[in-house]
Each structure stands twice: as C-alpha cells, then as structure tokens.
C-alpha cells in the first residue's frame, strides 16, 4: 500500500528531475546530454528501489501468462491453422451462431461488430484526463517562458538555474497533490474491500 512518506518522496523525485532537466539547459550540448542521461538513470534506479515489493507467495508466473499456444485459444501449429477442417465452416463440426460468434474452441471468441459497446463514461474520463494533461503541460511551459524572460530582463546572473529552482517548487506541489489524491483513492478502496 502507498504511504505518505512514499508520496512525498515520489513528488520530491519528480521535482528534482524537473529541476535538473531545466538546469542542464545552461550546459554545452555534450555535457547537457550526459547530465540528462545521468538524471534519467538516477530516476530509473530510484524508481526501481522505491517500487513496491511483490506480495509474499506471488510468483512472476502470476503476473505473466505462460500458457502455451493451445491453452490460449490459438492453433497449436501452423498446419492446424491452415488445414481445411479448421478453416472452412463445412469441415467444422460446429456451425457459427446467429450472432456471428464462433463457439469453436479452436479459435479465440471474437464478438461481432454489433456487440462492441463503448462505455461513454470511461471515454469521457479519458478525454478529460488527456485534456487536463495537455493544459497542464501548456501552462507549465508558459510559466517557464514568463519566468525566464523576467529573470533575464532583470539581469539575473544565472536565470536558468533560478528557473529550475522555481519550477522544482511548482512541480513538487503539483506532484504531491496528485500523489496524495492517489493515496486517498487507494485507502478508500482498501476500506471498501475490507
């Protein structure tokens, strides 16, 4: 389960990534690429270390299906797929149902196009999340440009570094809000499940 210290640590990690990415703009291209590669490596390592441990007793096989082709509903060999009995409805012992779905165990069950239903609520939530993400990125970029322009016009010695510090604070606040919301949802689900 997620915890408050983990939420704060993840927000701080994201803020550090953002600040170091912006601060690297002052470096020459080769050093900037090297610095950003190091940041990505450090974040990947920290993400690996901070990732939750698997539950005791769970095996990797529980996460991934190790079923053979015959268990997955696909033909076990290419010759079985190309045989006349498997490919023609006349050679098969079971006919297709009126809805267009083949009840044959030789192939995966595929619903007909008329049965495909879009969940409008999930689609609306997806569009809203995508819209909020794009708006947040655009707003963040506008804020960066405005602050960098002001710092440069006022003669700051290192405007990019100062921008990195400011954006780190913004990133930390935003990410902490997201992490706390996720923590709250996880706790509500846990209470409902028990």
Image (tube, helix red, strand yellow):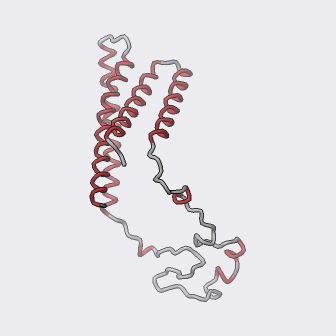
What residue appears at the point 47 percent right and 86 percent down from the top-left corner? 98
**Residue 149: x percent and y percent?**
32, 20
Quadrant into which the C terminus falls = bottom left
Front residue of 70 and 102: 70
Q: Is residue 165 above or below residue 187?
A: above
Q: Is residue 163 left or right of residue 44?
A: left
Q: Is residue 90 left or right of residue 59?
A: right
What residue appears at the point 61 percent right and 71 percent down from the top-left corner? 74
Q: Where on the picture, by quarter, is residue 159?
A: top left
**Residue 48: x percent and y percent?**
49, 40
Front residue of 37 and 156: 37
Hey, which residue is sitting farthest front in the picture? 56
**Residue 121: x percent and y percent?**
30, 61
What residue appears at the point 46 percent right and 76 percent down from the top-left corner? 112
Q: Is residue 194 above or below residue 102?
A: above
Q: Is residue 116 above or below residue 18?
A: below
Q: Is residue 46 above or below residue 113?
A: above
Q: Is residue 69 left or right of residue 48?
A: right
Figure disc tally: 0
Q: Where on the picture, by quarter, is residue 133?
A: top left
**Residue 72: x percent and y percent?**
58, 70
Front residue of 58 and 71: 58
Q: Where on the picture, by quarter, is residue 61?
A: bottom right
What residue appears at the point 48 percent right and 38 percent down from the top-left corner? 49
Hey, which residue is sitting farthest right in the picture? 79
């Amino acid at each position: 389960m997620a915890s408050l210290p983990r939420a704060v640590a993840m927000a701080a990690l994201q803020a550090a990534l953002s600040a170091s990415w912006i601060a690297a703009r002052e470096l020459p291209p080769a050093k900037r690429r090297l610095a950003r590669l190091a940041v990505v490596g450090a974040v990947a390592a920290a993400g690996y270390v901070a990732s939750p441990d698997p539950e005791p007793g769970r095996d990797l096989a529980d996460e991934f299906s190790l079923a053979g082709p015959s268990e997955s509903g696909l033909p076990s060999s290419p010759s079985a797929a190309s045989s006349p009995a498997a490919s023609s409805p006349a050679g098969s012992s079971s006919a297709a149902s009126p809805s267009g779905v083949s009840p044959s165990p030789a192939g995966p069950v595929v619903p007909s196009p008329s049965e495909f239903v879009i969940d409008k609520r999930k689609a609306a939530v997806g569009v809203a999340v995508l819209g909020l993400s794009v708006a947040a990125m655009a707003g963040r970029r506008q804020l960066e440009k405005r602050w960098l322009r002001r710092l440069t016009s006022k003669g700051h010695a290192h405007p990019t570094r100062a921008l990195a510090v400011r954006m780190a604070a913004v990133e930390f606040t935003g990410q902490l809000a997201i992490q706390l919301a996720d923590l709250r949802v996880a706790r509500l689900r846990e209470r409902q499940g028990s």
